[in-house]
Image: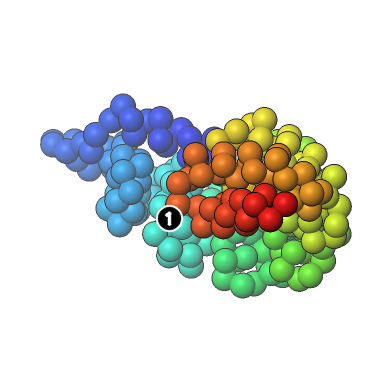
Amino acid sequence: MLFLAGILAVALCLSPASGADRELPEVHFTNGLVYYALGFTEMATKELQRVCELEPTNNEARMALGLAYQAKGDLNSALKAYEEVLRIDSSLLHVHGLMGDIYRAKGDSKKARAHYLEASKDPELLAIPYYGLGVLAEEAGETTEAMANYREVLAAAPEHTDAALRLVLLLRETDAIDDALQVVTEANRYNPRNAELHYQWGLLYLEKEEYDKAHHEFDRVLQLEEGHPGARKQLQDLQKRSKEN
């Protein structure tokens, strides 16, 4: 989210403020952003709550408050903060994406889907709602719909590794190995140091019986993530195969 990126950028330049102007809304806001970026979500929520008390229509503070609640796992409070954001400005469609994530985490797929669909009305926000819709479809056993949604995510945000990995797994399950290889190869262009991408790449080469290429990918996994159990086992199996042949 661009808003979250802004929070982190501000936090790098600031520190919690205090002093004679301690009750100014902007001071509480600054403190809240810094505490959020540092991972002190309890302190962040207190500061941001105070901003909302002092400036009830400050939507930036309410958004940050919702994010802080969400980060500390208080999903009901996060929902209330986001609902208030939309009450003040209903045009902020990205908030529906955040609410969709919360309802999905709470197991309410019907409400999650409704919010994702609302968020998808923003053409610049497709990755977030379509990823959520993909997960919902996958959980419901709707493989074709899930794959279509993950492809929408990658069309909008080709660097979205989670969507690529989920799509690759579904393609493997449906024996579409060449399609899966194409997805993982493209994803690697954007995230060449992602160990799980290389692991899936290796598994796909195994499916095609291209053992040298599989060995290379599993070896690359261990270079990136030394303790990866799957890659280590696959390398051991390949070594046994080589000795037997």
Total labels: the figure holds 1
On the rendered structure, is 100 left or right of 73? right
Q: How crowded is the residue under tag 1: few (<14 C-alpha within 10 Å), some, or many (20+)?
A: some
With 154 as the anchor, is 21 left or right in this view?
Answer: left
Residue occupying the point 72% across, 52% down? 245
Q: Amino acid at mark 1?
A: Ala
Position of 73 relative to 8 (above/below): below
| Residue farthest top in this picture | 13
Q: Quadrant of residue 178?
A: top right
Query: Whole-percent x and y of residue 56?
Result: 42, 49
Q: Nearer the viewer, residue 86 or 93?
A: 93
User: Is 230 placed above or below 157 here?
Assistant: below
How was this image coloured? rainbow
Name the residue at 65% across, 52% down: 243
Residue at mark 1: 71
Residue 150: image location, x then y, percent: 76, 49
Residue sitting nearer the eye, 186 or 25 = 186
Residue 74 in percent (x, y) is at: 43, 65
- Give me the residue at 40% from left, 35% from top: 8
Image quadrant where one finds the N terminus: top right
Residue 184 image point, x, y percent: 72, 41
Image side of residue 195 versus residue 143, left or right: left
Which residue is found at the position 33% from the left and 30% from the top? 12
Task: Specify the farthest residue to the left.
Answer: 19
Residue 61 shows in this picture: yes
Q: Is residue 26 above or below residue 244?
A: above
Evaluate whether residue 130 shows in this view: no
199 displayed left or right of 78? right
Circle 1 SS class = helix
